[in-house]
Amino acid sequence: MTLFLLAIILRVVNLQYVQGDAYRELATELTVRQDTIYANKGNVYAADGNLLATSMSKFNIFMDLVTVDNTIFEENIVSLSNELSKMLGNSSSYYQKKLRTAKNRKRRYFLIARNIGYTDYLKMRKFPIFNLGVYKGGFIAKHRTERAHPIGKIAERTIGYDDFRGEAGIEGAFADYMQGENGLRWEQKIAKNQWKPITDFNEKEPIDGHDIITTIDVNIQDITHHALLRKLEYFEADHGCAVVMETATGEIKAISNLGRTKKGKYYEKRNYAVWESHEPGSTFKLASLMAALDDKFIDTSTVVDTEKGKIFIHGSKVEDSHRGGYGKISAARVFEVSSNVGVVKLIKKHYDHQPEKFIKKLETYGFTKAIGFPIKGEGRPVVPIPSDKRWNKISLEWMSWGYGVSVTPMQTLMFYNAVANNGIMVKPRFIKELRRQDKTEKVFETVVVNPKIASDETLSKIRKVLENVVVRGTANNIYSSNFSMAGKTGTAKKYLPKYKDENGNTVAAGYSNKHYVASFVGFFPAENPKYSCIVVIHDPKKEKGYYGATVAGPVFKEIAQKIYTTTPVDNQSVEDKASFEEIEMQYATYDDVLSKSHTQIPNVKGMSGMDALSLLENIGLKVEISGVGKVKYQSLKKGEKLVKGNTITLKLS
């Protein structure tokens, strides 16, 4: 027994002193850990300061009922239950029963509430018992953050995200900048493999991320989103996008991208304006007309024979939507009525032997390479060149009316915006500045892609033709005498790869007679443009309409009209030509009185108080007025000698 006792003593000494530090460290590792407190990401703001995206704190509240003294528990359970009832909704007796049961079962991690906000968390910390803290009150709060968009789903794809789905939009592009610095706190392991904070304070407080100020205008964004949504719903289209851009700066004021679910609802499915590269159709004709004008091959008055609205080039048919064609018309009229035959004949005549010259113009217009946005997923343009394998004997002619090329809506908008901006092509941008703790860290200035895309003479003619498209061309259905717009319609057949129809029959690849892309792009006001805008709608229901003027044009008009009426436009002016003879005579008399050199007190009886005040002060008198209306009494009589600096009292009726 002595030897056995001695062995135990030696073992205890060995564990306590020889290997004690190692075992204590192991015990600490198994029962105590350092928990990460994740920092809130920076906020995303609209240009006017409205929140577009922010991190919201959410808390799960637990209670360690073992640590709460029995006396304290019994004295405060009713008042605690009353407070929980007020905040969470169930009756006070419900919480009393739950808490007593958990106390009897010695629950150390009893759930009180899930997903409460920061304000409710602060209130709950002050409830009876909970206000004693972690060890005396058993109050355990598990904090997490979730991303919220205060304006809802509007512009969601452009605002983007940085989470398990990947990196998209603005948040994805600036993820590193927006990430904050995580905090730390110690936690202790308790029963059932659960962990609770050791102290009420954090070892290291988290530091929130930095903020981004976008160019988005919430009012214009709301207008654009709902204008697009209404037309998508009416035409039962597959998807569409609409973008509003400030002409001089390139700032994107609104961008809406809506796709259709199987149930017919629309949501921000993809960033079609940036991502989707497609054949633009007739909106591309502006590049063709501008190239020929700027190269001095044609003028807007150049006559083109559109024949009977149908021609064949190397066996491929080019046809106008207007049956019978337009006959012999000017190049300007070709554009206004969107004659495919007219545009093709113009480009074929002047560029067929030198297609490289035409391609060079497209490069000047920004169509041959991606814009280069910081956000991911930008579509790549496809513009064939003579040295490509894709190039064939009709490539040039097909490009001239918007087929055989593929560009994104943002590229088309950037080109039209340059026309509106006196030939200065600016890069579209979504970000105004980056901020760190309310201090501006970086400002994003306007980037000029091309200082002059065409001559002033060409640009002047082009802008007039674009205005006439709305006044008397394919978009005359959206004309308004109240405000001016300029732009171009586009209607393109969609090219579909080989597929099987509903009957299982194989349908060869080719351009569909059922699937269309309707578009409209332009700027407003036409005389001194403030904004440019593009609307693109894919696969509208053909029975309801599929032309750009019918489907996309009205969206453009609604956006322009509502921006006119809800936001100030600096360059708008009103000329009031109303003339009233009696009023003009009164003002002439008044001006005559003021212009004369006075030596006597004038008669101001019957004049309005403000007019009398102005007159008397201008001749050097001090004026005291009582009442409102017209002058019925003046203290200095008419004809008295004028002494500048004297006071005259006026009583008004």
Image (tube, grey):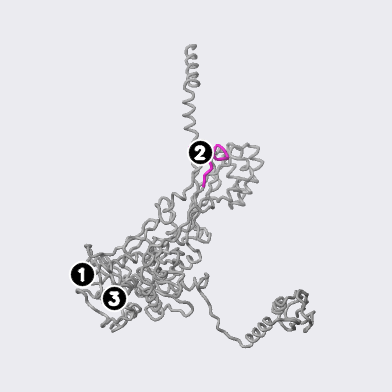
Give the secondary structure at mark 3.
loop
User: Does the image show residue 548?
Assistant: no
- Please provide the residue range marked out in magenta: 190-207
Please name which of the two marks, 1 or 3, marks the residue nearer to the observer. 3
Identify the mark nearer the N-term, 1 or 2. 2
Q: Nearer the viewer, residue 122 or 398?
A: 398
Spatial CA distance of label 2 from label 3 is 80 Å
Spatial CA distance of label 1 from label 3 is 22 Å
Q: Which mark is residue 195?
A: 2
Give the secondary structure at mark 1.
loop
Q: Nearer the viewer, residue 628 or 454?
A: 454
Describe residue 52's horizontal placement relative to residue 350 as left or right: right
Q: Residue at x 52, y 52 (%)?
A: 56
Q: Nearer the viewer, residue 432 or 216?
A: 432
Where is residue 192 shown, x and y percent of the image? 49, 37
Whether residue 203 is in magenta: the answer is yes
Q: Which mark is residue 53?
A: none
Residue where numbered disc 1 is placed: 393
The residue under label 1 is which amino acid type? Lys
Spatial CA distance of label 1 from label 2 is 73 Å
Residue where numbered disc 3 is placed: 297
Looking at the image, the residue that sits furthest to the top is: 2
The residue under label 3 is which amino acid type? Phe
Q: Residues within 10 Å of mark 1 (few under 14, many from 20)?
A: few
Where is residue 32 shown, x and y percent of the image? 50, 34
Identify the mark nearer the N-term, 2 or 3. 2
Where is residue 456 shown, x and y percent of the image? 38, 73
Describe residue 27's horizontal placement relative to residue 323 as left or right: right
Whether residue 597 is in magenta: the answer is no
